[in-house]
Each structure stands twice: as structure tokens, then as C-alpha cells.
Amino acid sequence: MRGTGHDLEGIVDAALELLDAFGLPDLSMRRLATHLGVQPSALYWHVENKQSLLAAVADRIVSEAAPATGVRETARALRDALLNRRDGAEVVVSTAALSLGSDALEARIRSAYEAAGSADPARDATVLAQFVLGHTYLVQQRMQAAAIGAYDADPADVAAATRADFEAGIDRLTTP
Amino acid sequence: MRGTGHDLEGIVDAALELLDAFGLPDLSMRRLATHLGVQPSALYWHVENKQSLLAAVADRIVSEAAPATGVRETARALRDALLNRRDGAEVVVSTAALSLGSDALEARIRSAYEAAGSADPARDATVLAQFVLGHTYLVQQRMQAAAIGAYDADPADVAAATRADFEAGIDRLTTP
DNA sequence: ACCTGAACACCGTTCAAGT
DNA sequence: ACCTGAACACCGTTCAAGT
């Protein structure tokens, strides 16, 4: 954790650690700097601002999705990747206009539609990506509420109980 | 704007004005207090914290959706209500676990499914609500990016161009 | 090239005290 | 009942200066 030789990759690593440990609301530039053993201002040598850092975090989260073939399998892999990081969906959605993350997510779905011989893979991918992100965001929010105790359920149970909703969604959105 | 006799309703009114004028990132408790001609601490007599205030704002946004019959018409009315307020979708999604807003949105869709004779209105409504929120959030983010100039399109055009995506989505999600 | 130190302009929230 | 004043513990970001 000495303050020498950091690069963007290492900063994203550290940001993901804080994200999983404390959640997005507590992921501040100052905490991140402390975690790296560095002054807050040092981060701005490597990163333009917090928004672009979060975009890089989003890209990384999406890139961690397992390889998959088929539209449904791809959608599941992407959902799993978002669920695998605390507040993962929120990070990806909130930086969608800046990061490649959301584009990468949609692009992977589009490739799957193309391979499946869709008549309009671009539109199909847009629609399914919007569902995947909306679904996962809301699921993850309920998980967080459950962890706080505002919601009377176990966080892990929430994920399980909502899997059927997700399957119903991709079922309708993948069979024309 | 004198500092006498405010209630939650009036505070939500003022918050919506600031939201439309400056967007969610610039909607702070301090700015809101200034807008109301009052000290920041005065707000905490009427509201527990910022989160619950945003939840009340979310409820109001959803409540402004036009009455509609039919699943598709209901989904369109809700999308329009979110698009009608700057960052409306983000406000509703981000307070989904706290506010009635997201529940109200899903409840309205559920009623429409029930009236249409759905075999599983609860699941259908959950899935469609997730799509409506995900879709609208991403559309609105592109509109905001277009307004900043980061996206090479007119904000109004973005809304128009994405309407076809929305129709494609509700088409798949409403016809079993 | 990479980081520190110090500052600027902000936040949300609490709480005694006023009226 | 409703609000002020003042404080606490934070933010993101900039920029001269150090090495």
C-alpha cells in the first residue's frame, strides 16, 4: 500500500475492494486514496475525475462476465457478473453513457442474437440489455435493503427468488 | 419563499422544481433550503433525511402518470411520467426499496395485467416494471448526455428514436 | 513522472437555542 | 410547532510545490 507506482488498473482493483466491502455510497475518492496509502490529489494524476474512474470500474465488472454461447446463457452470465459485485448494476447503469461497460454488455448480447439468427439483433439486444440492467438493479437494491434489515428476507434468498422473474423475462424477450 | 408554514407537499414541489432545472446531482438539501428561503436544518423538521425526501419525490413522479386502460397503455403512461421529469427514472429506481413509487408503478401494471386476464399477473408485472425502469433510465441518461454534448444527438430526438425500442419491448412482454 | 500539502467550494445531519 | 445558528464530519477537485 505504499504510494509508488500506481496505475489505472491498480486503482480499479482497489476501488472494487472498497465497493464490495462498503458499497457504492461509501466509495469516495478520499477513502480510496487512504486505501492506497496516498493523498487524494494523487488519484487525479491517473484519473480525470470520479465519474471516469467509476466508468472504468463498470467496464471491469462487465468484462468479468463468464464466456457464454446463446442469448439466454449470455444474459445469465452478465446478470451474474453484476450480482457478483456489490452495487454492480448501479455502477454499470449509472455510467452507461460514459463507459464502454454498458455498450460491452449490449454488444455481447447482440453477438449472441446474431449467432442465433435474429432478424433485428440491434433492437433485440437493446431491449434485452435494458431488461437485464433494470432487473438486476432492482434485485440488488432489495438485497441491500435486506442486508440493512429494512426488508424482511435474507439477501441470498432475494437473489434466488428473483431468478424465476429473470428467466420469465428472458423467456419472453428471446422467443419471438 | 418566506420560511413559514412549509409542509412535505410544498417541499416536494420545490424539489421537483430544482430537479427539472438543475438535475439530480445538483439537488442538495442546502440548495433546496435556499430555494425555500429557509436554513438547511429546517428541512429536517419535515423530513427524516434526504433519502426519504427523494422517495416522496419518486412517489409524486409516479403518481403523475396519466390514467390508462390496458397493459401497453399503462406502461406508456408510466414511461411518459418518468420522462416528464429530469432524471425521473433515476429518482424512482434509486428509491425503489424505500418509496411506494416503484411499488405503485408495478401495482398499476399488475392491475392492468389482471384486467387483461393474465395467468400470472404478479410475475408479468414485475418483469415489465423492470423493463420500463431499465429502459427509461438508460434513455434519460442518453438524453442528459446529449444535452451536455457528449452524445451527438438532440435530446428530443433520443426520446423519439428510443420509442420504437420501448414498443418492441412491451410487444414481447405483453403477448405470451 | 508521480506525489504531497494546502486550499476552495461544497455536502448531509445534529442539536441546542430561539420564537 | 417550527425555525435559526453553529457546529461536526465529511465530500470532489485544483494547483503550486516537492522529489
Image (tube, coloured by chain):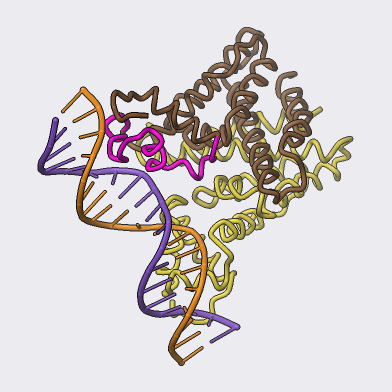
Chain colours: A brown, B yellow, C orange, D purple
Which residue: 42% across, 42% down? A28
- The front one of B19 and B154 is B19
Q: Quadrant of residue B99?
A: bottom right
- Dominant secondary structure, magenta: helix
Q: Quadrant of the C terminus of chain B?
A: top right
Query: Where is residue B167 drawn, in percent x and y?
Result: 65, 33
Is residue B99 depicted above or below D12 in this figure?
Answer: below
Query: Where is residue C9 drawn, in percent x and y?
Result: 28, 57
Q: Which residues are magenta?
A: A21-47
Which residue: 36% across, 41% down? B148
Q: Is residue A29 magenta?
A: yes
Q: Quadrant of residue A41?
A: top left
Total count of labels = 0
Q: Quadrant of residue B56?
A: bottom right
Q: Quadrant of the N terminus of chain B?
A: bottom left
Q: Is residue B2 magenta?
A: no
Which residue: 85% across, 41% down? B116
| Relative side of B103 to B4, left or right | right
Query: Where is residue B93 drawn, in percent x and y?
Result: 60, 45
| Relative side of B10 to A118, left or right | left
Query: Where is residue A126 drawn, in percent x and y?
Result: 58, 25
| Relative side of B28 to A81, left or right | left
Which residue: 66% across, 43% down? B76
